Image (tube, grey):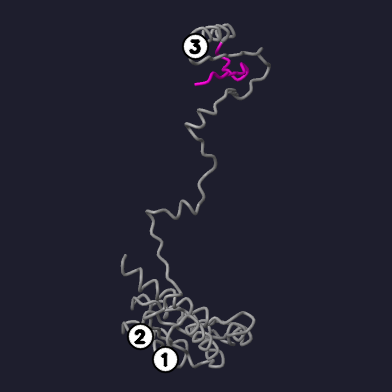
Amino acid sequence: MAPFTLSLDPCSLPHCLPPSSSSSSSSSSSSSSPSSLVHQLHLHSPCERPKPAAISISSSLQGARAQFPIRQGKPSSSSLLRTAAVRHLEGSVTGTAGLRFGVVIARFNEIVTKLLLEGALNTFRKYSVREEDIDVVWVPGSFEIGVVAEKLGKSKKYHAILCIGAVIRGDTSHYDAVANSAASGVLSAGLNSGVPCIFGVLTCDDMDQALNRAGGKAGNKGSEAALTAIEMASLFEHHLPLV
């Protein structure tokens, strides 16, 4: 190994060491060093205030660095997450062959729900879902969606159930009861049937908000829900049975 020079600032040494011992250690160190490695310690004059320990090494360590490469920085979070030992399962929206979908749609606020259904069917068509693989079931209102969705899920004919409705706030608390019941009903349908039931029910303060989310400036939530149904159907069909 190439010789190097080690310099210690005596101000960083503990105060318990007397100056004489420091100087003697310097001379003994230089005399007892191996012939293949030369150590030189230089102790400077004491200072008034101690400083943090500082060790400087100057040498031609290119050879040592070549033998022991130093990796700087931390590995990225993506490299930690995606390793050969970790499986990442996610559905696909491109492989829809063989997937069947049920759509439960509320007739109440039909001016809105028809637009949501149109957006959903267009998305199914865009992602190559055949029309004969889609069944649409109409129910009176959003309150009735949950029980029908669960019935379709338990039939095991469908890979995902898309639930479409529109609940608009009125002058009474009826809105809260229907909105909460629709959400919990769709959730229970998925849990009890084991088939993904997608919540595509709008809960809006007024009709303008609903229309904006049924193909207006806020997009079409029926289309977004259909895309979610495709991905979840793919996930359950191709991955989760293997777990």
Whether residue 147 is situated above or below residue 31 in the rendered picture? below
- Taking 20 as reference, is 91 left or right? left
How packed mark 2 is, by other alpha carbons closer than 10 Å (few <14, some 14-19, many 20 or more), is: many
Name the amino acid type tagged 1: Val
Q: Which residue is label 2 attached to? A: 152
Name the amino acid type tagged 3: Ser
Residue 148, x across and y down, in percent: 38, 87
How packed mark 3 is, by other alpha carbons closer than 10 Å (few <14, some 14-19, many 20 or more), is: few
Residue 216, x across and y down, in percent: 62, 84
Q: Are marks 3 and 1 in contact (CB under 8 Å)?
A: no
Foreground mark, 3 or 2, reads 3
SS type, badge 1: strand
Name the amino acid type tagged 2: Leu
- Quadrant location of the C terminus in the rendered image: bottom left
How packed mark 1 is, by other alpha carbons closer than 10 Å (few <14, some 14-19, many 20 or more), is: some
Q: Nearer the viewer, residue 117 or 190?
A: 117
> In 3D space, how far apart are the residues under numbered discs 3 and 2 (Cα atoms)?
85 Å
Asked which quadrant contains residue 196, the reply is bottom left
Compare marks 3 and 1 and give the one earlier in the sequence: 3
- Please name the residue shown 61% across and 25% down the image: 52
The span shown in magenta is: 1-17
Asked whether residue 80 is drawn in magenta, I would say no
Residue 137 badge: 1
Residue 33 badge: 3
